[in-house]
Amino acid sequence: MTNATRADIRDVPLAVSSTGAGRDRDTPAASGRFKRLYNIAEIRKAALSALPRPVFDFADGAAEDERTLRRNVEAFADVALLPRPLNGAASCDLSVELFGRRLAMPLVIAPTGLAGLFWPDGERESARAASASGIAYCASHGSVCTLEEIAGTGVEPRWMQVFVYKDRGFTREMVERADAARYSALVLTIDNQLLGNRERDLRNGFTIPPRFGLAGTLSTATKVPWLLRMRTALPRLTFGNYVRPGHANDIASLAGRLAELLDPGLSWAEVDWLRKIWRGPFIIKGVLHPDEAREAVQRGADGIVVSNHGGRQLDGSPASFDALPAILEAVSGRIPVLMDGGVRRGSDVVKAVASGAAACLIGRPQLWALAVGGMAGVQHMLGIFRREIDRTMGLMGVSRTSDLGPHCLVPSRFGRR
Ligand SMILES: Cc1cc2nc3c(=O)[nH]c(=O)nc-3n(C[C@H](O)[C@H](O)[C@H](O)COP(=O)(O)O)c2cc1C
């Protein structure tokens, strides 16, 4: 791209630039039915209109008073971007290298259970969108499709998220299935061995399978397009990876079994064991304490994700972006440090990468985008991130993600009340 082209794009209004001059080539949907969904907040609003309230709240909500959820988003406002426009970033290379693979931008789709509740075949739709956008996809243990079905989309790089179960044989089986289905990385989530207290679900009477209280039933009745779309998927909704011949495989039985299966006594011993049985990159997700990050490196982890599960587990735990600096210091560049939680703007991604994160995972925005348009919706959402990262870097005078660093950031008072 020439200087002139970049300048043209910068100076025209968003509505024109987002359909012009070749920047949206990989997001054909941007000029069509998603035209009004010009940022992640608008996609969230559209999801709120599209989904029955209990389903929307299942994704949107978090634990108890949702303080960590709110702080995840707000933390980004405490840092400001310090531009150097005379560096002349005529075009930006957003790509990053992660675990030996190049990603088109520093984003990964986060593992989110029950994506198939938001759109039929939701996991495969998201995986295809990730693939089309050149980023990695992390499958959840709790996907509706099986991990093999997701692998069947051919999405690469594909990562598999697992838990540790009381039955180590079952844990091993999950890992072996991920290996057989050629997942390139294993992600062990450590912050979900007990389920967080999600009060929106209690208030809505949300259960698995979805059986809504009176208000929820009324809300569902007004969401006819979702109901029609989901009419054949809903009765088949289940946790695909847990289905066993000869067992009760309906989602209610599986949800009950899952809660029983998880081992709340998870410790470093299981981390060591998983490290031994998984040959590829091994990533620990849910790290917030610098000492735990240091130990993860010593125990052979290849990466960590600074995460509080989107505020869905321990309310009152630090925001991921707040926790990031101490963890980066503890790890001191020995392994990639990723983060998730509250990433809603390309500028948030730029701030995380400038702080030292290797990439960000995107949780809820993926589910909102699925709810409004399946694969096309997720591709559109990723296109928004791509354009926002590109524009932010362009405005900052930074041409490559590798040129982002702490020198691009200053403390800000934006976030202070
Ligand atoms: C509905 C929902 C389901 C989730 N399921 C999982 C899961 O199965 N495994 C996991 O490790 N994290 C899960 N997460 C957490 C995400 O991977 C991620 O850490 C979090 O959503 C990031 O925050 P964000 O939603 O603000 O982007 C889930 C999050 C949501 C919203």
Image (cartoon, rainbow, N blue to C red):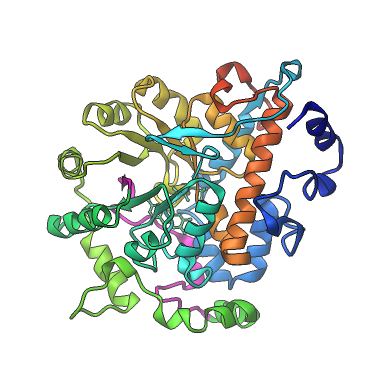
For residue 196: magenta?
yes
Q: Quadrant of residue 146?
A: bottom left
Give above or below for 275 relative to 412: below
Q: Quadrant of residue 169?
A: bottom left
Q: Start and end of the magenta stretch?
A: 184-213
Pick the front one: 161 or 278? 278
- Where in the figure is residue 8, as x and y percent of width and height? 85, 35
- Where in the figure is residue 58, as x and y percent of width and height? 49, 64
What residue is shown at x 59% (from left), y 16% (from top)? 407
Residue 288 visible? The answer is yes
For residue 168: magenta?
no
Task: Tell me if 211 is positioned left or right of 303 in this view.
Answer: right
What residue occupies the far right of the structure in this picture?
A: 12
The number of numbered badges drawn on the structure is 0
In terms of secondary structure, what is the magenta stretch mainly? loop
What residue is shown at x 33% (from left), y 61% (from top)? 147
